[in-house]
Image (spheres, rainbow, N blue to C red):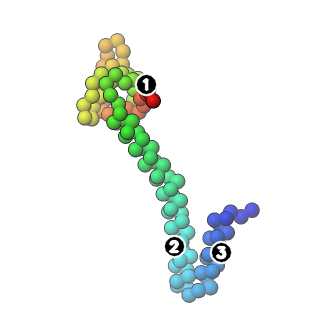
Amino acid sequence: MPNLATTWLFAFTDATDSTDATGGSLIGFLLPLVIIGGLFYFMLIMPQRRRMKAVDEMRKGVSVGDEVRTIGGIYGVVKSMDDDEVVLDVGQGTTLRVVKRAVAERLNVQE
């Protein structure tokens, strides 16, 4: 069973083929490219931007005392913070200084 979008696309290109040869072929050529570009944007780029925005908001919400996991898989409690650095207490008095972008997840989220 043909897809509705495919049927519409074929119907539209058949209708443009009967028009002027240069105008019809240009529309018939550009329309699928525009449709594919739009699908690419809405299926890949927009969701990625949403995820990046959510991660940025999470990183802005990290505060001293939060338990976090870094992108390297290190678990620790935030001991202090700077504009772009976080000091983590990873246990037994050991601290690590990491960039804020390395924080992947807050573990003790209270909602």
Q: Secondary structure at mark 1?
A: loop
Residue 8, above or below 110: below
Residue 16 spot, x, y in % from top left: 59, 81
Count of numbered tags: 3
Q: Amino acid at mark 1?
A: Asn
Whichever of callouts 2 and 3 sits on the residue coming sooner in the sequence is 3
Outermost residue toward the left in this view: 82
Residue 3 occupies quadrant: bottom right
How packed is label 2: few (under 14 Cα within 10 Å), some, or many (20 or more)?
Answer: few
Name the spot of residue 35 as percent of width and height, x first. Answer: 54, 65
Could you say which is closer to the camera, residue 27 or residue 109?
109
Q: Residue furthest front?
A: 111
x%, y% of residue 25? 55, 80
Could you tell whether 36 is left or right of 84 in the image? right
Q: Find disc 2 in the rendering and name its residue.
A: 30
Residue 108, label in figure: 1
Q: Residue furthest bottom?
A: 20
| Label 1 crowd bin: few (<14), some (14–19), many (20+), radius 10 Å | few
**Amino acid tagged 3:** Ala
Q: Considering the image in quadrants, where does the C terminus appear?
A: top left
- Against 62, residue 7 (above or below) is below
N-terminal-most mark, 1 or 3: 3
Q: Residue at x 65, y 72 (%)?
A: 10
Q: Residue at x 50, y 52 (%)?
A: 44
Instruction: Classify 48 as above or below 76.
Output: below
Q: Secondary structure at mark 3?
A: helix
> Would you say the residues marked 2 and 3 are in contact, meaning their CB atoms lie under 8 Å apart?
no
Residue receiving disc 3: 11
Image-quadrant location for residue 31: bottom right
Mark yes or no: residue 72 visible. no
Tell me how far mark 2 sits from mark 1, CA to CA: 51 Å
